[in-house]
Image: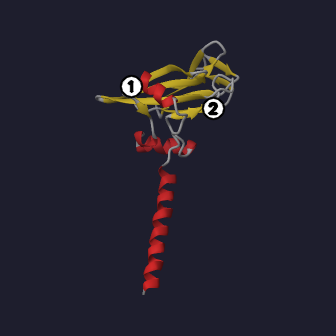
Amino acid sequence: MRMRINLISVAILWFFTMGQQGFAAQSKDDCSFPSGLQEEITKRFPETRLLRLTDLSAHDRNLFQKEHGNRCPGFVKVDFYGDGKPTFARVLISMEAPKKTAELIVAKQIAGGWDIHLLEKTDGAPVVWSQGPGTYTDVYGQKTIHSANRVIVFCGYESWAILYAWTGKGVDKVWLSD
């Protein structure tokens, strides 16, 4: 009888341990980033937080996960400037009544801190990802960007998408959909 209770206890312990690991893997949205960056963003953008999978509607979450898995929809590491230095695009959201506001920022690590720039501000909960270097033409066929570096895509699903590229002198953008 005592042996049976021990086996049941071990089985229950194993179930909970493996269940917790499985749950953590399913719910993780990989929104980790370097220490120091969060502190700097909190100073510059108070009352905002990083966009996560749970902030998306079920429909948008499904679309994002179909293409990007459980990656964080509000955070991407990207060699935006082509210099190999740590650079991150982040979507910060604030809860302003009655709707959400989202800000796309790009943060580059420099000696002694972070160089942070606001690229866009909009309503809702748009997502961010990176695409490779290349030639990108706007939705109207009127503007083309040639990028030697990776680019940033800021997307409000089923509504709009904007691509940002570093030109060597500044940031340029094209509307991929409108």
| Front label number (2 vs 1) | 1
**Where does residue 101 sit, x and y in percent of width and height?**
38, 27
The circle on residue 131 is: 2
User: Residue at (41%, 32%) from the top-left corner?
Assistant: 49
Give the percent coordinates (x, y) of residue 177: 53, 27
For badge 2, the amino acid type reads Gln
* Label 1 secondary element: loop
Characterize the local packing of mark 2: few (<14), some (14-19) or many (20 or more) Cα atoms within 10 angstroms: few
Residue 67 vertical placement versus 23 (above, below): above
Say the numbered circle drawn on residue 135. none
Mark 1, Cα crowd under 10 Å, few <14 / some 14-19 / many 20+, is few
Seen in the picture, residue 109 relative to 68 is either above or below; the reply is: above
Q: Which of the 4 quarters of the picture holds residue 33?
A: top right
How many numbered marks are there? Answer: 2
Q: Decide if residue 69 is on the left or right side of residue 4.
A: right
Q: Which part of the image, by quadrant, shows the N terminus?
A: bottom left
Residue shown at 62% from the left, 30% from the top: 78
Q: Residue at x 65, y 22 (%)?
A: 81
Q: Earlier in the sequence, mark 2 or mark 1?
A: 1
Residue ID at (48%, 73%): 10
Viewer-side residue, 117 vs 12: 12
Residue at far top of view? 169
In the image, farthest residue toward the left: 97
The answer to whether 176 appears left or right of 47 in the picture is: right
Amino acid carrying label 1: it is Pro
Separation (CA) of disc 2 from disc 1: 29 Å
> Residue 11 location, x and y as percent?
48, 73
Q: Secondary structure at mark 2?
A: strand
Circle 1 sits on which residue? Answer: 46
**In terms of depth relative to the viewer, which is nearer, 26 or 1?**
1
